[in-house]
Amino acid sequence: MNTRASTPTAPTAASGERSPSRITEWDALRGFALCGILLINIPQITRLSPASDSTTSNLVSDGLGMVVEGHFYPIFAFLFGLSFALFLDGAERRSKHPRLLLVRRLVFLGLLGVGHHLLQPGEALLPYAIAGLLVLLPASWLPNAVLVPVSVLVAVAGFTAASGGTFSIPGLFLLGLACARTGLADTAPRRPGRLRVVLAVAVLLSVPTVWAELVYPVDGPLASRISALAGVLGAIGYAAAFLLVLRTRLGRPVRALFEPLGRMALTNYLTATLIVVAVAGALGLHESSAWSTALLLALIILAIQAAFSRRWLRKFRYGPVEWVLRSITWWELVPLRRRSVPAGGIASAR
């Protein structure tokens, strides 16, 4: 559990970026994962105590540890790699030096991470930027016949030979890149049969893994690896289940709720930290065991961000921080205000 608690959690570099090939389901999935990320980030920022005399606080703490902690950062890391590939595809059509744009983009993310680290030591923008430069950028030259097996091997190694956490980021990045490059990003959300199989396999494998996590000694040599495996299986299950929900009658309202959050994930991630830091003292959260208060704060922040994101994106094409990131990437002030609402809710790429 401790290993997963220290795992960097952050939105993808391309959150809020739109391109004709972007699938809105991935944005909604990112918004869904953002909710889980905040539930874990608040205890990290405020250094909440895992134990409490309050039964309610203990239930909240244990519940978050079982069903949230470690289950959402793999989704973000995967989507980072996927978004990297989508942006590179668009940049190759518009620039003679597309990878230079990506370098500029990743460097700016890293600088954001340096500043964000002062408020949240467990933040992930800086490690994401470093891994993007050292792993994703070189991998973008690999042919699919090499990229696919390499991504699988690196991902497996990140959760077995290593203990998940930061070590899993390169593999998850590569899996997202491979998913986009092989076309799975275009077809997977619209293949409910395959998603059901993925969900079933994830659930079946999660049962013995969660059982092992419960009975295995916390200080045992394999504890962190078991927790990491339980987390990634949970992430796969959550992602498959969420994408399946989008194919049902509930899909439209669920997408309407989570897609704006996902499109502005970078803005929402950073502003959530600012809000938590600003109000934590007044709420008595610092080094306390007020898990119920932390949960309530997370729900309030998410409700405000969901409403704000939806309202903002009616008038503007990108979130505020996403627009700055995109302008620096292209080294020009890209249009921000929306001229008209495109069909399907997808704004133009540039």
Image (cartoon, rainbow, N blue to C red):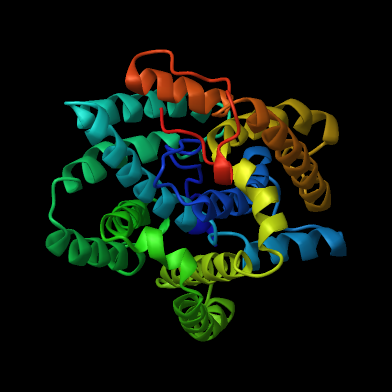
Q: How many marks?
A: 0
Q: Is residue 228 visible?
A: no
If the image is split into quadrants, where does the N terminus sit? Answer: bottom right
Choose between 9 and 79: the one closer to the eye: 79
Q: Residue at x 45, y 29 (%)?
A: 113
Give percent across and percent down for residue 48: 70, 47
Q: Is residue 121 visible?
A: yes
Give percent across and percent down for residue 45: 63, 38
Give percent across and percent down for residue 197: 47, 82
Viewed as shown, does residue 150 lie left or right of 213?
left
Q: Residue at x 45, y 42 (%)?
A: 12
If the image is split into quadrants, where does the C terminus sit? Answer: top left
Give percent across and percent down for residue 64: 68, 61
Viewed as shown, does residue 291 lie left or right of 74?
right
Q: Quadrant of residue 68?
A: bottom right
Find the residue positioned furthest to the top.
Answer: 332
Viewed as shown, does residue 279 lie left or right of 256?
right
Q: Residue at x 38, y 59 (%)?
A: 185
Q: Quadrant of residue 283?
A: top right
Compared with 83, 200 (above or below) is below
Q: Residue at x 25, y 45 (%)?
A: 136
Compared with 334, 345 (above or below) is below
